[in-house]
Image: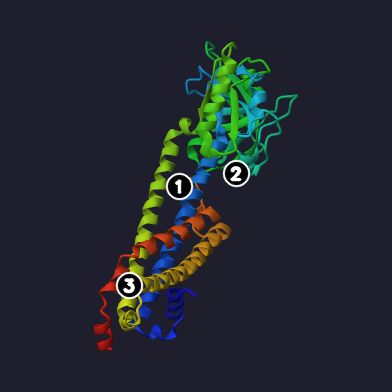
Amino acid sequence: MNTEFFIARRLFFDKSKQQHLSGRIIRIALFGVALGLAVMIVSVAVITGFKSQIRNKVTGFGSHIQIVSYNARNSYEIPPISANQPFLKELKQSDNIKSIQVFATKPGIIKTIDVTHGIIFKGVDPDFNWSFFKQNLVEGEIPQVSDSARTNAFLISENIARILKVKTGDKAVLYFINENEFNPRILQLQVAGIYRTNLEEFDNLFVVGDIKQVQRLNDWQPNQVSGFEITVTDFKRIEEINREIRDLVVNYSENESDILQTETVTSQYQAIFDWLSVLDMNVWVILSLMILVAGFNMISALLVLILERSTMIGVLKALGSTNLKIRRVFLYLAVMITARGLFWGNLAGILIIVLQKTLHIIKLNPATYYVDVVPVNFSVTHLLLLNLSSIVLTTIMMVIPSYLVSQISPDKSIRFD
C-alpha cells in the first residue's frame, strides 16, 4: 500500500479538522478552485459559441471558399465563367469538400413607392442549400427555385423589409444598371420570405432569388455563372484546402479561356475574422488569471495544513520518514482538495451552460453583438482539457510550498506539543 496516499486520505476525510482554522481555509480554497473552474468553463463555452455563430453567419452568405473569375476585383459585379468546369468532377470526389454550388450576384436598387435601398441580388440554382436561411427565417417561406421557369419570388432580410415597409406577399421593384447602358433593367418580384441573422452588414445588403434572373439581366447563357461556392469539411484547414483547390483550378485553367482564382471567406472578410481571433487572447487571459487565483488559494491552504500538522510531521520524521515522503503526503492531500473543488466547479459551470442554452436567460443587443442571446458551445474535449490543466498546474504550483516540510524539526515540533 502507498503509505503517503493512505495518510493523505485519512487526513482528507478527518471530520475533526473542519472545526479548526485549516477547515475554514480549505473551504475557502475549495470555493476558489470551484469558482475559477466554473468561470473558465463558461468563458470558453461563450467565446467558442460566439465565434462559431458569427463564423457560421458569415459563411452562410458566401460559403467557405469561392472560385470566381480572375477579373472579379473583389466586386459583386463578377464577370461570368462557365458552370461546366473540367475540375469539378475531381473536386466533388475530394474528402475535404462537403458541397459545391453555383451562384451569381448583381448589385442593384430595390424600390417601393416611398423608399429606395441599395442591395446585392444573389442568384442561386435548384441545388442550393437553403439550410442557413431556413434557420434564420422569421416570416414566410423559402423561394422555390426550379430548373424550368424563372422564379419571381425572392428572400429579403428583416432590416430591408422594415426599411421598405413591406411584408411577405408584397411586390417590390428592383433596378439594375449594366455597363454601357443608360436605361436600367427592371425586375418586379414578390417577397416570399424574410430572414434575420443580426449581421447588419449582410442583412442590409443581400436578397436571394433565382439565378436565372441574374443571367437574364446580364444577357448570359444558361451555363454562365459568377462562380462556385465550396463548403469544406474542416474549417480549421481552410487555408490548406484552399491551396489544394487553387492548384487544381490553375492546372485545369492553363489552356482554358476562363482564368480563375480562389478566395477564402477569411480573406474576403478579414476584419471580421481578425476581430474573432482577438477573442482567443481574451480567453487565455481569463484562463491564466483563474488558474493563478485557484493555485494561490491552494498554496495558502497547503501552508496552513503543514503548519497545523507540524506535530504529525515531527513524529513521522522521528519514525524515519524522509522529507520527500512527507511532502508527498501533503501533495496528495492538496490534489484531493483540488479534485473536490473541480467537481463542484464542473457542476456549476455545466449547469450555467445548460440553463443558458435551453432557457436563453442572458440576452444581448443584436445591434452590438450580432446575436440576441449569449451563445454557448459545450465541448467535452474543452471540459477535459480545462480539468486536466487545472489540476496539473495547481499541483505544480504547490510543489514549492511543500518544501516547508524540510524546515520543521522533529525535536522542536514534538516538544512544543
Mark 3 crowd level (few <14, some 14–19, many ≥20, 10 Å Cα): some
Where is residue 131? Give x, y as percent: 64, 40
> Is residue 364 at all visible to an observer of this figure?
no
| Residue position for label 1 | 369
Where is residue 24? Give x, y as percent: 36, 79
Q: Amino acid at mark 1?
A: Tyr
Element type where label 1 sits in the image? helix
Side (left or right) of 237 relative to 293 = right
Residue 274 position by quadrant: top left
Looking at the image, tell me whether mark 2 or mark 1 is earlier in sequence order.
2
Instruction: Count all numbered tags in the image, as a single digit.
Output: 3
Looking at the image, tell me whether mark 3 or mark 2 is earlier in sequence order.
2
Measured in 3D between alpha carbons, the distance from the residue under mark 3 to the one under mark 2, in whole angstroms, is 64 Å
Where is residue 361? Give x, y as percent: 52, 60
The numbered mark at residue 45 is none
Residue shown at 71%/25% (left/top)? 150
Residue shown at 50%/17% (left/top)? 71
Q: Amino acid at mark 3?
A: Asn
Residue shown at 35%/70% (left/top)? 324
Residue shown at 44%/83% (left/top)? 14
Closest to the observer, 306 or 153: 306
Where is residue 112? Give x, y as percent: 57, 31
Q: Nearer the viewer, mark 3 or mark 2?
A: 3
Element type where label 2 sits in the image? loop
Q: Amino acid at mark 2?
A: Asn
Q: Nearer the viewer, mark 1 or mark 3?
A: 3
Closest to the observer, 357 or 26: 26
Residue 247 position by quadrant: top right
Element type where label 3 sits in the image? helix
| Residue position for label 2 | 136
| Residue position for label 3 | 323
Looking at the image, tell me whether mark 1 or mark 3 is earlier in sequence order.
3
